[in-house]
Image (cartoon, helix red, strand yellow):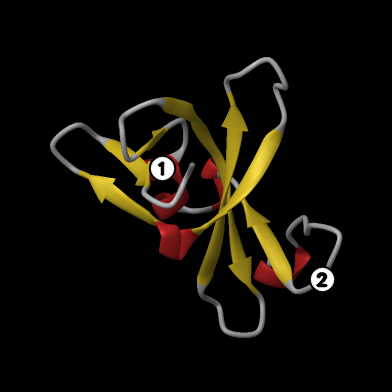
Amino acid sequence: MAYADRVTTGSTRFSRIFARDSMATELFNGCPVVTGAGAEIGEVDALLVDRKTHRLRYVVVLRRDSSAASVMVPWQSLYFDSALGRLVFYTYN
């Protein structure tokens, strides 16, 4: 499947990339996402790539709380904690 043919969000600016589409996405698929204090937010579902720049912009996180909704977290607000194998959202309140 061509890059431009992938499923997009409401805007055609971003392409939603799933684990089956990319080796890099496969590495993050299901990865826990936590707050800076270590409270669990959810896990990675997909990545959103900017079609114009081909840069990773957002991580789609499936929330684990009662809302069971997915949220888009800006990639720049995350860092990977390699010691514990998780993404940390350090600006989450």
Label ID, residue 12: 2
Local SS, label 1? helix
Mark 2 or mark 1, earlier in chain: 2
Residue drawn at x 19%, y 31% as measured from the top left? 84
Q: Quadrant of the N terminus?
A: bottom right
In the image, residue 45 sits, relative to residue 38, either above or below, namely below
In the image, residue 8 sits, relative to residue 65, either above or below, namely below
The amino acid on which the numbered mark 2 sits, given as a three-letter code, is Thr
Label ID, residue 28: 1
User: Residue 82, can we see it?
Assistant: yes
Q: Nearer the viewer, residue 9 or 69?
A: 69
Identify the residue at the far left of this view.
83
Task: Answer few, some or many: residues within 10 Å of disc 2's Cα (few below 14, many 20 plus, some between 14 and 19).
Answer: few
Task: Answer few, some or many: residues within 10 Å of disc 1's Cα (few below 14, many 20 plus, some between 14 and 19).
Answer: many
Residue 12 at x, y percent in the picture = 82, 71
In the image, residue 86 sits, relative to residue 39, either above or below, namely below
How far is mark 2 from mark 1, CA to CA?
23 Å
Q: Tell me: 84 left or right of 6.
A: left
The amino acid on which the numbered mark 1 sits, given as a three-letter code, is Phe
Label ID, residue 42: none
